[in-house]
Image (cartoon, rainbow, N blue to C red):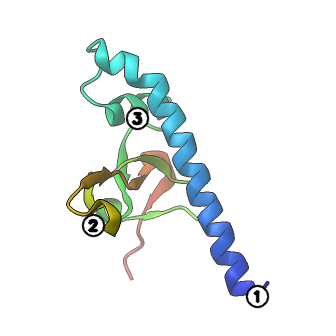
Amino acid sequence: MEPTTQIQTESLSNAKAAREALKAISNAVKPLVKAGAFNSVNEAILSTYKTEEHQEFKKFWEWKSQGFTIAKGAKAFPVWAQPVKKQASQETEGEEYEFFPICYLFSNAQVRRAANV
């Protein structure tokens, strides 16, 4: 297997694992959302990520626009992004479905104020 193909395969495998892990967390918090403890699944997921250290979560570009950089080696926290409507295959023409991409957030504990260059 060529190195590029191997990297692509590993990346795809990591994405599938991240999606499966996010599905598991989502299924665990759904009863709390239905009970009214949270307004959304993402809100409930973020509550599971919150600790004394990790309090505020934002996208990479949101931190960057506020003058922060992400610490080297920081691992993002996955949540669901806005659903995207997709067209099903040609055999089921006309049918649409929603695809939920993954959005990656970083916490206040993972960012540093950017040095002015």
Residue 91 x/y as whole percent: 34, 64
**Tags 1 and 3 touching, CB below 8 Å:** no
Name the kind of residue labelled 3 in the image. Leu
Q: Residue at x 46, y 56 (%)?
A: 111
Along the line of sight, which residue is nearer the eye, 80 or 54? Answer: 80
**Element type at mark 1:** loop
Q: Residue at x 39, y 23 (%)?
A: 30
Q: Quadrant of the N terminus?
A: bottom right
Q: Which mark is residue 30?
A: none
Q: Residue at x 47, y 28 (%)?
A: 27
Q: Which residue is mark 3?
A: 46
Name the kind of residue labelled 2 in the image. Ser
Q: Which residue is mark 2?
A: 65
When the figure is inspected, residue 53 is found, relative to residue 75, above or below; the finding is: above
Q: Residue at x 41, y 68 (%)?
A: 114
Name the kind of residue labelled 1 in the image. Glu
Q: CA distance from mark 1 to mark 3?
A: 39 Å
Q: How many marks?
A: 3
Q: Nearer the viewer, mark 1 or mark 2?
A: 1
Quarter location, residue 21: top right
Q: Residue furthest right?
A: 1
**Tags 1 and 2 touching, CB below 8 Å:** no
**Element type at mark 2:** helix
When the figure is inspected, residue 93 is found, relative to residue 17, above or below; the finding is: below
Q: Which residue is mark 1?
A: 2
Q: Residue furthest top?
A: 35
